[in-house]
Structures are given as structure tokens and as C-alpha cells.
Image (cartoon, rainbow, N blue to C red):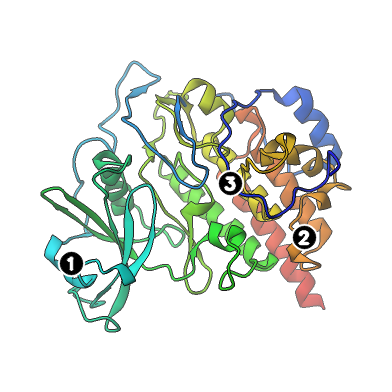
Amino acid sequence: MKHHDRPPRSWGLVACTSLFMMGNCAGVEGNINAEINPPSFSAPSSSGTDSKNISNNASDTSTFGTKTSVSSSSVPPTPRRETKILASSNVRKFTFNELKGATRNFRPDGLLGEGGFGPMFKGWMDERTLVPTKPGAGMIVAVKKLNLESLQGHREWLAEVNYLGQLSHPNIVKLIGYCLEDEQRLLVYEYMPRGSLDHHLFRKVSHFQPLPWNLRMKVTLEAARGLAFLHGANVIHRGFKTSDILLDSEYNAKLSDFGLAKDGPSGDESHVSTRVMGTLGFAAPEYVATGHLTRKCDVYSYGVVLLELLSGLRALDRNRPPDQRNLVQWSRPYITNKRRVIRVLDSRLGSQYSLSEAQKIAGLAQQCLSTDPRCRPGMDQVVTVLEGIQKANDAVRAGK
């Protein structure tokens, strides 16, 4: 295999422990911008950044005890995630027996999957009263049960309840309720029958066909809208990755997994300082290096997700040659050159896309992945660019 050849698709998953090299807008990035001409964004005066306990599993987020401080000497009100469940009319408190009934006592054949938090089970409830019903009656829900031995413990469970309990948006997964009873910690979500985005991109099974280009672009825009909404509410996801994007029956994308979410900086603060948590390959380099967290850290993670959508390759893969294991590092020479972008694109897509559209998406990914956070766009700007691309495509189709 030649040095610049596209990595084979059969290679698997990895966590790479090396830190990213940091740069600035006037250096390599400036030359890049002149070559591919991606959308231009103004750089804010403050930079963004976070500290150090990154998971070594690229498909799951492991967490540890988090100590939080704020960059300003003035301490803001207690963050949503820190102490107790906040009152919300959006979520219901269930008893453990109710959720046992809804899931038929957590029967193994109702297991939907298992992550760092614990197992997820299928359940049934009356759509109006939320009373448990027999299988096949009422609406399907997803019930997540905290594994007591899990690295993601009560703190992350509480963050999930408080953030999702307070936030409502078409591109944020809906939390229906929770259970806090003795040692039991459970969460009840709307059921997302298409599963997570990473399954559609990476799983080699018959019922997960390669996601077509038009659906990838739909997911790209809707995930951006979800993140833009969070940032507008001064919430930083902090652990954003491909597996956090869930798809409903119509392939509408919704963000999930808010266990690592944090309130963003307030007032004249430039960032929040905290221990680094997240997934290798998705975390912004300045966050890994310093522990400084801003919204631009989510923007970087979104850029990695864009690359995975474009390429069909995982962010990190230890089975690839050493110089190709890190998708961001390997793809930079290609996404910064219009003539070379095609080397990154998923070969399974065939001729489903126009090269000009792919070049625009690659240029956007390049901006999101800038090593200087000041050079990254805000998520609202990302949404504007993607909506412009969508409108242009719609106009072309209408003219045919």
C-alpha cells in the first residue's frame, strides 16, 4: 500500500494515546484556506479549552470523578449536573416496579444494547398515561439501567436527567422519565428504532446497509442543529461522537448521552476548567492539553463526525498503518485540496453525490478541525452553511 492510499475498510477500532499537535490560523491553516476555499468565519477574541481523563475506547466514553473549577474568581450558580434532580414538568419519576413491568423484568430478549452506562432494554407504556403495558400495546420506550460497576456512575446519571429534563428540541433525544430508588438508577427515553449512526457507518451486518449520501447530509445538518441549540442554551456536550447520534424511523437525527455535559462559561469567563473526559479521536487538542472547555471543543468533535460521515472510516483504528490510524491526521492533506478530496470519500457511495458538494462539506470539516479554536466556526454558522448547501441542492433538483 502506498503512503497516501485510502485505508482498507476491513480494519477495526482503536484508541491512540498520543496528543495532537497544536497550531495557529496564520500557519498551515492559512495555506489550507487559500487552497480549498472553505466557508470563512470570523475568529472570536477568546480561545476555548479542558483537562485529562480520556477514554481509551473509541466507541464508548469512560468517565471518572470530575472536579470542576471556573476560570473566573466569581463562582456561578450551581451547575445543572452537580447535586440534585431539578424539577421538570417534562419528565416523570417512575418506580422500579413500574419499569420492571414495562420491560418484562428486563428480559434478555428485550436487550437493545449495552454501553458504558449499562444495558438498554425495550419496554412498552401507554402513550398517554405512561403506565406499563403488554408487549405490542402502547408505545415502545428504551429503558437504560445503570450498571453499579459502571465507570459512569450517579454523577453522570444525574447530569443526563437534569440536562435532558430541561432541554427540548427536535434534534435532542427525549427523556420520558427516570427512576431513583435505593441503589437503582434508570432512565426512560423515546425509542429510536434505527439505532445509532455509528452502526450504519461501521457495522458489517446485513440489516445495516451503508447509509446513502442524502441521509448522511440530512444527519449532518440535524446533528449541527442539535449542537447549535445546546450552545444557545450555554450547554457544552463535551463527549460528542458518532455513537451519540440516534436515528428514528424516518432517519431524523437526535443527540443523546449527556452524562458528560457541562454548563458553558458565563459572564466574562473565556472557558470552564475541568478534568478531561471523553473519547480519544474526538476530543479537541486544546481540551486534551489544558483542560479548558468551550463550545469550540464540541465544534472540533463535530468536525471529526463529519470526517467519519464522509469517509465511512472510524476516527481511530489501530489496525491501519501507523500514519493512517488517526483519521483527522491522515485526511488533512486531502480535505484541504479540492482535487484530492475524493481520496477521503466513502467508496461505497459510488456516484450518489456531486463532487462540488463533497468539497464544500470537506472544507467545512477542515474549518471545524482547525487546531486553533478561534478559527473554528460556531455551530450556528455551521448550520447556516449546511442549510445553504441544502437549498442549492434542492434548487438543482427542482430544475431537472
Residue 119 lies, in percent from the top left, at 32, 57
According to the picture, the residue beneath numbered tag 1 turns out to be 100
Left or right of residue 63: residue 127:
left
Q: Amino acid at mark 2?
A: Ser
Residue 111 lies, in percent from the top left, at 34, 66
Q: Nearer the viewer, residue 137 or 18?
A: 18
Q: How much space separates mark 2 and mark 3, taking CA atoms?
A: 19 Å
Q: How much space separates mark 1 and mark 2, taking CA atoms?
A: 45 Å
Residue 245 lies, in percent from the top left, at 49, 56
Q: Nearer the viewer, residue 339 or 374?
A: 339
Dot 3 or dot 1, earlier in sequence: 3
Residue 151 vertical placement versus 276 (above, below): below
Neighbour tally class for label 3: few under 14, some 14-19, many 20 plus, Cα within 10 Å: some
Neighbour tally class for label 1: few under 14, some 14-19, many 20 plus, Cα within 10 Å: some
| Label 1 secondary element | helix
Residue at the top extreme, as displayed: 73
According to the picture, the residue beneath numbered tag 2 turns out to be 347
Image point 71% across, 53% down: which residue?
311
Q: Amino acid at mark 1?
A: Lys
According to the picture, the residue beneath numbered tag 3 turns out to be 13
- 2 or 3: mark nearer the eye: 3
